[in-house]
Amino acid sequence: MAKYRDYLPQIDGDFFTDGGLETILVFHDGIDLPHSAAFDLMKYKDGRQRLREYFDPYIDIAREAGAGFILESPTWRANTDWGRRLGYSASTLEDANRDAITLMHDVRDAHDGSLPIVVSSCIGPRGDGYDPGDIMSPVEAETYHSPQIEAFADAGADMVTTITAANMTEANGIISAATKVNMPAAISFTVETDGHLPTGQSLWDAIASIDIATNEAAAYFMINCAHPTHFQDTLKRGGTSLGRLRGLRANASCLSHEELDIGNPQELGHQHDHLLSDFPHINILGGMLRDGSPSFGRNSKSRSGKIQDSGVPFNRAQRSGAKAYRVSTKRLLATKTACN
Protein backbone atom coordinates (compact mmCIF):
# COMPACT_ATOMS: atom_id res chain seq x y z
CA MET A 1 0.00 0.00 0.00
CA ALA A 2 1.22 3.51 -0.82
CA LYS A 3 2.30 5.44 2.25
CA TYR A 4 3.30 8.88 0.99
CA ARG A 5 1.43 9.32 -2.27
CA ASP A 6 -0.71 12.14 -0.92
CA TYR A 7 2.27 14.13 0.33
CA LEU A 8 5.95 13.39 -0.32
CA PRO A 9 8.06 14.01 2.79
CA GLN A 10 11.09 14.98 0.67
CA ILE A 11 9.25 18.17 -0.22
CA ASP A 12 10.05 19.42 3.29
CA GLY A 13 13.02 17.38 4.50
CA ASP A 14 16.48 16.17 3.62
CA PHE A 15 16.59 12.83 1.81
CA PHE A 16 19.20 10.52 0.37
CA THR A 17 18.72 8.13 -2.49
CA ASP A 18 21.01 5.56 -4.09
CA GLY A 19 23.53 6.10 -6.86
CA GLY A 20 23.59 3.63 -9.71
CA LEU A 21 22.20 0.15 -9.19
CA GLU A 22 23.09 -1.19 -12.60
CA THR A 23 26.64 0.18 -12.48
CA ILE A 24 27.30 -1.45 -9.12
CA LEU A 25 25.87 -4.78 -10.23
CA VAL A 26 28.05 -4.82 -13.34
CA PHE A 27 31.32 -3.18 -12.23
CA HIS A 28 31.37 -4.08 -8.54
CA ASP A 29 29.55 -7.40 -8.42
CA GLY A 30 30.65 -8.61 -11.84
CA ILE A 31 27.10 -9.66 -12.76
CA ASP A 32 26.27 -10.23 -16.40
CA LEU A 33 23.35 -7.84 -16.80
CA PRO A 34 21.97 -7.93 -20.36
CA HIS A 35 20.76 -4.49 -21.45
CA SER A 36 21.51 -3.20 -17.90
CA ALA A 37 18.15 -4.65 -16.84
CA ALA A 38 18.37 -5.10 -13.06
CA PHE A 39 14.71 -6.12 -12.82
CA ASP A 40 15.54 -9.37 -14.60
CA LEU A 41 17.40 -10.51 -11.45
CA MET A 42 14.08 -10.84 -9.61
CA LYS A 43 13.54 -14.14 -11.39
CA TYR A 44 16.25 -15.68 -9.21
CA LYS A 45 16.37 -16.14 -5.46
CA ASP A 46 19.97 -14.88 -5.23
CA GLY A 47 19.13 -11.96 -7.49
CA ARG A 48 16.24 -10.84 -5.30
CA GLN A 49 18.45 -11.06 -2.23
CA ARG A 50 21.16 -8.95 -3.88
CA LEU A 51 18.62 -6.31 -4.81
CA ARG A 52 17.42 -6.17 -1.19
CA GLU A 53 20.95 -5.89 0.18
CA TYR A 54 21.98 -3.21 -2.30
CA PHE A 55 20.07 -0.50 -0.47
CA ASP A 56 21.32 -1.27 3.07
CA PRO A 57 24.49 0.89 3.10
CA TYR A 58 22.61 3.84 1.65
CA ILE A 59 19.81 3.53 4.20
CA ASP A 60 22.37 3.25 7.01
CA ILE A 61 23.99 6.53 5.93
CA ALA A 62 20.60 8.26 5.71
CA ARG A 63 19.67 7.04 9.19
CA GLU A 64 22.97 8.19 10.67
CA ALA A 65 22.54 11.60 9.02
CA GLY A 66 19.01 12.07 10.34
CA ALA A 67 17.65 12.12 6.81
CA GLY A 68 14.99 10.15 4.98
CA PHE A 69 15.56 7.79 2.06
CA ILE A 70 14.04 7.29 -1.38
CA LEU A 71 14.01 3.70 -2.63
CA GLU A 72 14.20 3.51 -6.43
CA SER A 73 12.78 0.25 -7.76
CA PRO A 74 15.04 -1.82 -10.08
CA THR A 75 12.76 -1.11 -13.05
CA TRP A 76 14.77 1.41 -15.05
CA ARG A 77 14.73 -0.97 -18.05
CA ALA A 78 11.31 -2.55 -17.40
CA ASN A 79 9.47 -0.87 -20.27
CA THR A 80 8.05 -2.42 -23.43
CA ASP A 81 11.03 -2.06 -25.76
CA TRP A 82 13.70 -3.25 -23.35
CA GLY A 83 11.44 -5.93 -21.89
CA ARG A 84 10.82 -7.36 -25.36
CA ARG A 85 14.57 -7.64 -25.93
CA LEU A 86 14.75 -9.77 -22.79
CA GLY A 87 11.84 -12.00 -23.82
CA TYR A 88 9.11 -10.47 -21.66
CA SER A 89 5.53 -10.29 -22.88
CA ALA A 90 3.22 -7.45 -21.86
CA SER A 91 1.76 -9.67 -19.15
CA THR A 92 5.05 -10.90 -17.69
CA LEU A 93 6.48 -7.38 -17.81
CA GLU A 94 3.50 -6.04 -15.86
CA ASP A 95 4.04 -8.78 -13.27
CA ALA A 96 7.72 -7.87 -13.00
CA ASN A 97 6.93 -4.20 -12.42
CA ARG A 98 4.40 -5.05 -9.73
CA ASP A 99 6.82 -7.50 -8.12
CA ALA A 100 9.54 -4.85 -7.99
CA ILE A 101 7.32 -2.58 -5.93
CA THR A 102 6.49 -5.46 -3.61
CA LEU A 103 10.24 -5.97 -3.17
CA MET A 104 10.68 -2.29 -2.31
CA HIS A 105 7.90 -2.55 0.28
CA ASP A 106 9.78 -5.47 1.81
CA VAL A 107 12.91 -3.33 2.08
CA ARG A 108 10.96 -0.48 3.64
CA ASP A 109 9.26 -2.79 6.11
CA ALA A 110 12.65 -4.12 7.23
CA HIS A 111 13.62 -0.58 8.29
CA ASP A 112 10.18 0.55 9.39
CA GLY A 113 10.07 3.32 11.96
CA SER A 114 13.77 4.17 11.92
CA LEU A 115 13.49 6.79 9.17
CA PRO A 116 10.97 7.87 6.52
CA ILE A 117 11.38 5.75 3.38
CA VAL A 118 9.60 6.64 0.15
CA VAL A 119 8.98 3.88 -2.40
CA SER A 120 9.65 5.37 -5.82
CA SER A 121 8.92 3.47 -9.02
CA CYS A 122 11.87 4.06 -11.33
CA ILE A 123 11.23 4.67 -15.02
CA GLY A 124 13.93 4.86 -17.64
CA PRO A 125 13.69 6.35 -21.11
CA ARG A 126 12.35 4.35 -24.02
CA GLY A 127 15.77 4.49 -25.63
CA ASP A 128 19.25 5.49 -24.45
CA GLY A 129 19.43 7.86 -21.50
CA TYR A 130 22.49 9.53 -23.02
CA ASP A 131 21.19 9.86 -26.56
CA PRO A 132 17.76 11.34 -27.29
CA GLY A 133 17.39 9.15 -30.38
CA ASP A 134 13.91 9.15 -31.94
CA ILE A 135 11.95 11.62 -29.85
CA MET A 136 8.31 10.82 -29.11
CA SER A 137 5.61 13.44 -28.84
CA PRO A 138 4.17 13.98 -25.34
CA VAL A 139 1.04 12.02 -26.33
CA GLU A 140 3.11 9.14 -27.70
CA ALA A 141 5.23 9.11 -24.55
CA GLU A 142 2.15 9.11 -22.33
CA THR A 143 0.70 6.15 -24.21
CA TYR A 144 4.00 4.30 -24.19
CA HIS A 145 4.78 4.67 -20.47
CA SER A 146 1.22 4.36 -19.12
CA PRO A 147 1.18 0.54 -18.72
CA GLN A 148 4.28 0.60 -16.53
CA ILE A 149 3.03 3.54 -14.47
CA GLU A 150 -0.39 1.94 -14.01
CA ALA A 151 1.27 -1.24 -12.74
CA PHE A 152 3.28 0.82 -10.26
CA ALA A 153 0.18 2.63 -9.06
CA ASP A 154 -1.75 -0.61 -8.56
CA ALA A 155 1.19 -2.14 -6.69
CA GLY A 156 1.26 0.70 -4.16
CA ALA A 157 4.29 2.81 -5.10
CA ASP A 158 4.39 6.27 -3.55
CA MET A 159 5.64 8.05 -6.67
CA VAL A 160 7.26 7.79 -10.08
CA THR A 161 10.80 8.96 -10.79
CA THR A 162 12.23 9.11 -14.28
CA ILE A 163 15.99 8.62 -14.24
CA THR A 164 18.26 9.64 -17.17
CA ALA A 165 15.55 11.57 -18.98
CA ALA A 166 17.18 12.77 -22.19
CA ASN A 167 14.49 14.97 -23.73
CA MET A 168 11.66 17.22 -22.67
CA THR A 169 8.74 15.68 -24.56
CA GLU A 170 9.17 12.19 -23.15
CA ALA A 171 9.28 13.70 -19.66
CA ASN A 172 6.05 15.58 -20.47
CA GLY A 173 4.30 12.36 -21.40
CA ILE A 174 5.49 10.53 -18.28
CA ILE A 175 4.21 13.30 -16.03
CA SER A 176 0.83 13.25 -17.80
CA ALA A 177 0.57 9.46 -17.44
CA ALA A 178 1.43 9.65 -13.74
CA THR A 179 -1.05 12.46 -13.13
CA LYS A 180 -3.88 10.38 -14.59
CA VAL A 181 -3.37 7.72 -11.91
CA ASN A 182 -2.76 10.28 -9.14
CA MET A 183 0.93 9.48 -8.80
CA PRO A 184 3.45 12.23 -7.94
CA ALA A 185 6.23 12.31 -10.54
CA ALA A 186 9.82 13.55 -10.45
CA ILE A 187 12.07 13.98 -13.48
CA SER A 188 15.85 13.53 -13.32
CA PHE A 189 17.62 14.83 -16.42
CA THR A 190 20.87 13.64 -17.92
CA VAL A 191 23.05 16.63 -18.81
CA GLU A 192 26.18 16.84 -20.92
CA THR A 193 29.49 18.51 -20.01
CA ASP A 194 28.00 21.89 -20.97
CA GLY A 195 25.04 21.48 -18.63
CA HIS A 196 22.55 21.02 -21.48
CA LEU A 197 20.32 18.05 -22.20
CA PRO A 198 21.53 15.57 -24.87
CA THR A 199 19.14 17.32 -27.27
CA GLY A 200 21.07 20.58 -26.81
CA GLN A 201 18.18 22.20 -24.94
CA SER A 202 19.07 24.10 -21.79
CA LEU A 203 18.02 22.52 -18.50
CA TRP A 204 16.04 25.57 -17.48
CA ASP A 205 14.21 25.84 -20.78
CA ALA A 206 13.23 22.18 -20.46
CA ILE A 207 11.97 22.59 -16.90
CA ALA A 208 10.08 25.80 -17.67
CA SER A 209 8.50 24.29 -20.79
CA ILE A 210 7.42 21.16 -18.93
CA ASP A 211 5.92 23.23 -16.13
CA ILE A 212 3.93 25.28 -18.64
CA ALA A 213 2.72 22.19 -20.52
CA THR A 214 1.75 20.25 -17.38
CA ASN A 215 0.67 23.12 -15.12
CA GLU A 216 3.62 22.40 -12.82
CA ALA A 217 2.43 18.85 -12.24
CA ALA A 218 5.93 17.46 -11.58
CA ALA A 219 6.80 17.18 -7.89
CA TYR A 220 10.37 18.32 -8.58
CA PHE A 221 13.32 17.91 -10.93
CA MET A 222 16.82 16.47 -10.52
CA ILE A 223 20.15 16.15 -12.35
CA ASN A 224 21.83 12.78 -12.80
CA CYS A 225 24.99 11.30 -14.33
CA ALA A 226 27.00 14.50 -14.46
CA HIS A 227 29.95 15.96 -12.59
CA PRO A 228 29.39 19.20 -10.61
CA THR A 229 31.66 21.09 -13.01
CA HIS A 230 29.21 20.22 -15.79
CA PHE A 231 26.27 21.97 -14.16
CA GLN A 232 27.50 24.40 -11.50
CA ASP A 233 27.36 27.36 -13.90
CA THR A 234 23.95 26.15 -15.09
CA LEU A 235 22.67 26.33 -11.51
CA LYS A 236 23.84 29.93 -11.24
CA ARG A 237 21.64 30.77 -14.25
CA GLY A 238 18.57 29.03 -12.88
CA GLY A 239 16.37 32.07 -12.48
CA THR A 240 12.74 31.43 -11.56
CA SER A 241 13.03 27.69 -12.28
CA LEU A 242 15.91 27.13 -9.86
CA GLY A 243 13.63 26.23 -6.98
CA ARG A 244 12.11 23.39 -9.02
CA LEU A 245 15.47 21.56 -9.02
CA ARG A 246 15.65 19.66 -5.73
CA GLY A 247 18.07 16.77 -6.23
CA LEU A 248 21.49 15.70 -7.52
CA ARG A 249 22.86 12.27 -8.45
CA ALA A 250 26.38 13.19 -9.54
CA ASN A 251 29.24 11.38 -11.23
CA ALA A 252 32.72 11.42 -9.72
CA SER A 253 34.21 11.61 -13.22
CA CYS A 254 34.40 15.02 -14.85
CA LEU A 255 34.64 13.50 -18.34
CA SER A 256 31.84 12.99 -20.84
CA HIS A 257 29.55 9.95 -20.76
CA GLU A 258 31.66 8.32 -23.45
CA GLU A 259 34.95 8.87 -21.57
CA LEU A 260 34.12 8.18 -17.91
CA ASP A 261 37.12 7.46 -15.70
CA ILE A 262 37.82 6.91 -12.00
CA GLY A 263 37.42 10.59 -11.16
CA ASN A 264 38.45 12.32 -7.94
CA PRO A 265 36.22 11.34 -4.99
CA GLN A 266 37.82 13.85 -2.61
CA GLU A 267 37.23 16.68 -5.05
CA LEU A 268 33.66 15.51 -5.61
CA GLY A 269 33.01 15.74 -1.89
CA HIS A 270 34.24 19.32 -1.69
CA GLN A 271 32.26 20.30 -4.79
CA HIS A 272 29.06 18.83 -3.34
CA ASP A 273 29.71 20.78 -0.17
CA HIS A 274 30.03 24.05 -2.07
CA LEU A 275 26.91 23.35 -4.12
CA LEU A 276 24.84 22.70 -1.00
CA SER A 277 26.14 25.93 0.52
CA ASP A 278 25.27 27.95 -2.58
CA PHE A 279 21.94 26.22 -3.25
CA PRO A 280 20.49 25.22 0.15
CA HIS A 281 17.11 24.32 -1.35
CA ILE A 282 18.68 21.19 -2.89
CA ASN A 283 17.74 18.52 -0.37
CA ILE A 284 17.85 15.18 -2.23
CA LEU A 285 21.28 13.62 -2.74
CA GLY A 286 22.28 10.45 -4.51
CA GLY A 287 25.40 9.23 -6.20
CA MET A 288 27.86 6.41 -5.97
CA LEU A 289 31.37 5.37 -6.74
CA ARG A 290 32.40 2.60 -9.03
CA ASP A 291 33.68 0.41 -6.19
CA GLY A 292 30.17 0.42 -4.77
CA SER A 293 30.63 3.15 -2.15
CA PRO A 294 28.03 5.93 -1.84
CA SER A 295 29.38 9.32 -2.91
CA PHE A 296 27.87 10.98 0.14
CA GLY A 297 27.72 10.16 3.81
CA ARG A 298 27.19 11.06 7.41
CA ASN A 299 28.68 14.53 7.48
CA SER A 300 26.00 16.70 5.99
CA LYS A 301 24.79 20.23 6.19
CA SER A 302 22.14 21.32 8.68
CA ARG A 303 19.12 23.27 7.47
CA SER A 304 15.76 24.08 8.99
CA GLY A 305 12.68 21.92 8.59
CA LYS A 306 11.02 18.84 9.96
CA ILE A 307 9.95 15.49 8.62
CA GLN A 308 8.30 12.66 10.46
CA ASP A 309 7.66 8.97 10.03
CA SER A 310 5.94 6.66 12.51
CA GLY A 311 6.38 9.21 15.27
CA VAL A 312 10.14 9.58 14.74
CA PRO A 313 11.03 13.29 14.34
CA PHE A 314 13.79 14.53 12.06
CA ASN A 315 14.33 18.20 12.85
CA ARG A 316 17.06 19.69 10.70
CA ALA A 317 17.36 22.74 12.94
CA GLN A 318 18.37 20.46 15.82
CA ARG A 319 21.16 18.68 13.93
CA SER A 320 24.78 19.34 14.73
CA GLY A 321 25.96 21.51 11.85
CA ALA A 322 28.41 19.82 9.53
CA LYS A 323 27.74 16.38 11.00
CA ALA A 324 24.10 16.29 9.90
CA TYR A 325 23.67 16.68 6.14
CA ARG A 326 26.97 17.13 4.35
CA VAL A 327 28.96 15.15 1.82
CA SER A 328 31.26 12.68 3.59
CA THR A 329 34.81 13.59 2.64
CA LYS A 330 36.15 10.83 4.88
CA ARG A 331 34.32 8.15 2.93
CA LEU A 332 35.32 9.68 -0.37
CA LEU A 333 38.99 9.82 0.63
CA ALA A 334 38.90 6.07 1.27
CA THR A 335 37.50 5.34 -2.20
CA LYS A 336 39.87 4.50 -5.03
CA THR A 337 37.60 4.29 -8.02
CA ALA A 338 34.60 6.31 -9.06
CA CYS A 339 31.97 6.32 -11.74
CA ASN A 340 28.19 6.44 -11.96
Image (spheres, rainbow, N blue to C red):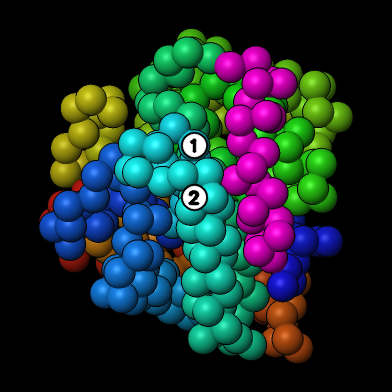
For numbered disc 1, what is the local secondary structure? helix
- Viewport quadrant of the N terminus: bottom right
Q: Splitting the image into 4 quarters, where does residue 204 fall?
A: top right
Q: Which residue lies under the disc numbered 2?
A: 93
Q: Is residue 199 above or below residue 188?
A: above
Q: Callout 2: few (<14), some (14-19), or many (20+) C-alpha neighbours within 10 Å?
A: many
Q: Residue at x 64, y 88 (%)?
A: 113
Q: Is residue 15 magenta?
A: no
Q: Is there CB contact under 8 Å for labels 2 and 1?
A: yes
Measured from the top left, where is residue 18 in percent x and y? Answer: 43, 59
Q: Is residue 137 magenta?
A: yes
- Left or right, 235 with reference to 75: right
Looking at the image, which is closer to me, 245 or 47? 47
Q: CA distance from mark 2 to mark 1?
A: 8 Å
For numbered disc 2, what is the local secondary structure? helix
- Viewport quadrant of the C terminus: top left
Name the magenta segment's main secondary structure. helix
Q: Is residue 106 above or below residue 244?
A: below
Measured from the top left, where is residue 298 in percent x and y? Answer: 43, 72
Q: Residue at x 82, y 50 (%)?
A: 182
Q: Residue at x 51, y 86 (%)?
A: 110
Measured from the top left, where is residue 227 in percent x and y? Answer: 36, 36
Residue 309 in sight in this render: yes
Q: Which residue lies under the disc numbered 1?
A: 80
Image disc number at residue 189: none
Looking at the image, which is closer to me, 204 or 320? 204
Measured from the top left, where is residue 268 in percent x and y? Answer: 32, 47
- Left or right, 324 with reference to 14: left
Tell me where the magenta segment starts and ends, as one range: 136-159
Looking at the image, which is closer to me, 47 or 307? 47
- Left or right, 156 with reference to 287: right
Q: Is residue 15 above or below residue 193?
A: below
